[in-house]
Amino acid sequence: MTGESTAPSSNPLFGIAADGRPGWRKPLLIGIACRLARAPSARPSEWGTRMRRIKGGVHVQRRYKEKGWHPLPSVRKAWGLTAERPPD
C-alpha cells in the first residue's frame, strides 16, 4: 500500500475526488432512490400482474406437493395417484 486513502470521500465515483472534482455516481444514485421512494408505482401494471401470477403459481405448486397431488395425468398415473383433485 502506498498510503492512499480508501475512504468513500476520496473515491471519485461517490464523493469528492482527491483533486477536488465532484463525483458523478452518488448524485445519480440518490436521485434514483428518491424517485423510487416517492413513486413506487412507477413500474407498469403488467409487472405487478406477472409477479402475482408467479407468486400464485408457486403457492399452488407448494400446496399440491404438500397434499401429494400432481396436475398432469401422466405423472399421476406414473406415481399411482388418484385422478381426483385434493380438497382445498
Image: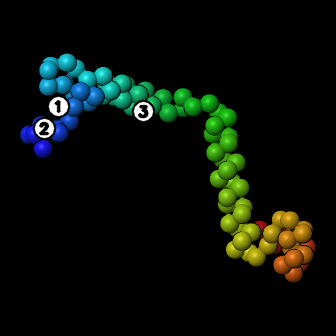
Task: Tell me the distance, in whole angstroms, between the alpha carbons under discs 1 and 3.
Answer: 28 Å
Is 9 located above or below residue 61 in the figure? above
Q: Are marks 2 and 1 in contact (CB under 8 Å)?
A: yes
N-term-proximal mark, 2 vs 1: 2
Q: Viewed as shown, does residue 18 lie left or right of 32?
A: left
Task: Tell me the distance, in whole angstroms, between the alpha carbons under discs 2 and 1.
Answer: 7 Å
Circle 3: residue type? Ala
Judge the density around disc 2: few (<14), some (14-19), many (≥20) Cα neighbours within 10 Å.
Answer: few
Image quadrant of residue 76? bottom right
Circle 1: residue type? Ser
Q: Viewed as shown, does residue 15 lie left or right of 40?
A: left
Task: Read off the residue under disc 1.
Answer: 10
Relative image position of residue 21 (x, y in whole percent): 19, 18
Q: Secondary structure at mark 3?
A: helix
Relative image position of residue 5 (x, y in whole percent): 13, 37
Task: Read off the residue under disc 3.
Answer: 37
Image quadrant of residue 33? top left
- The C terminus is located in which quarter? bottom right
N-term-proximal mark, 2 vs 3: 2
Q: Secondary structure at mark 2?
A: loop
Task: Tell me the distance, in whole angstroms, between the alpha carbons under discs 2 and 3.
Answer: 33 Å
Could you say which disc has been placed on residue 5 in the image?
2
Image quadrant of residue 20? top left
Judge the density around disc 3: few (<14), some (14-19), many (≥20) Cα neighbours within 10 Å.
Answer: few
Q: Residue at x 68, y 40 (%)?
A: 49
Q: Nearer the viewer, mark 1 or mark 3?
A: 1
- The N terminus is located in which quarter? top left
Circle 2: residue type? Ser
Relative image position of residue 4 (x, y in whole percent): 12, 37
Q: Residue at x 62, y 30 (%)?
A: 44
Q: Viewed as shown, does residue 78 lie left or right of 46?
A: right
